[in-house]
Image (tube, rainbow, N blue to C red):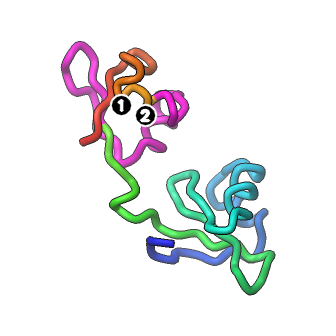
């Protein structure tokens, strides 16, 4: 897994509390063999101690910055799609679909990778 190890949590509950997240999301991602990402971090279970959850800083090459536009004018830059989704209240897939040209807009904005 690419990225810098930030924290090892003693339990799933403490990881959820740290990011004010949904336990089901982190649990489902961290139980996959290779781990996964959510809430702007990469997660995986400790391979030696099942209860421990590891949080990694996302690698820059996997976390693309995005910008939203309205009527051709740039409105704001975001460090990640996750950050953009939290601010505008959209799901990540909808923003990606707009970036890839599958839809014209998401939440009234056009989206592009920076």
CB of mark 1 within 8 Å of CB of mark 2? Answer: yes
Task: Looking at the picture, tell me which residue is in the foreground, 27 or 23.
Answer: 27
Horizontal and vertical percent for residue 108?
40, 15
Q: Is residue 64 magenta?
A: no
The residue that mark 2 highlights is 96
Q: Residue at x 49, y 35 (%)?
A: 85
Mark 1 vs mark 2: in front: 1
Horizontal and vertical percent for residue 54?
63, 73
Task: Looking at the picture, tell me which residue is in the foreground, 69 or 47.
Answer: 47
**Is the residue 51 above or below the residue 90 in the image?**
below
Which stretch is magenta? Answer: 67-94
Q: Residue at x 74, y 86 (%)?
A: 48
Disc 2 secondary structure class? helix
Horizontal side of residue 55 vs 100, given as left or right: right
The picture quadrant where one finds residue 11 is bottom right
Number of residues whose C-alpha sits closer than 10 Å to that of mark 1, classed few (under 14), some (14–19) or many (20 or more)? few
Q: Residue furthest left?
A: 73
């Amino acid at each position: 897994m690419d990225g810098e190890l930030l924290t090892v949590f003693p339990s799933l509950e403490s990881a959820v509390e740290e990011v004010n997240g949904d336990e089901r999301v982190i649990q489902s991602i961290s139980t996959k063999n290779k781990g996964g990402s959510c809430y702007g971090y990469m997660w995986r279970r400790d391979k030696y101690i099942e209860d421990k959850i590891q949080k990694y800083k996302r690698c820059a090459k996997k976390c693309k910055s995005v910008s939203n536009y309205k009527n051709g004018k740039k409105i704001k830059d975001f460090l990640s799609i996750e950050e953009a989704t939290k601010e505008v209240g959209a799901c990540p897939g909808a923003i990606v679909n707009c970036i890839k040209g599958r839809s014209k807009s998401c939440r009234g904005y056009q989206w592009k990778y920076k």
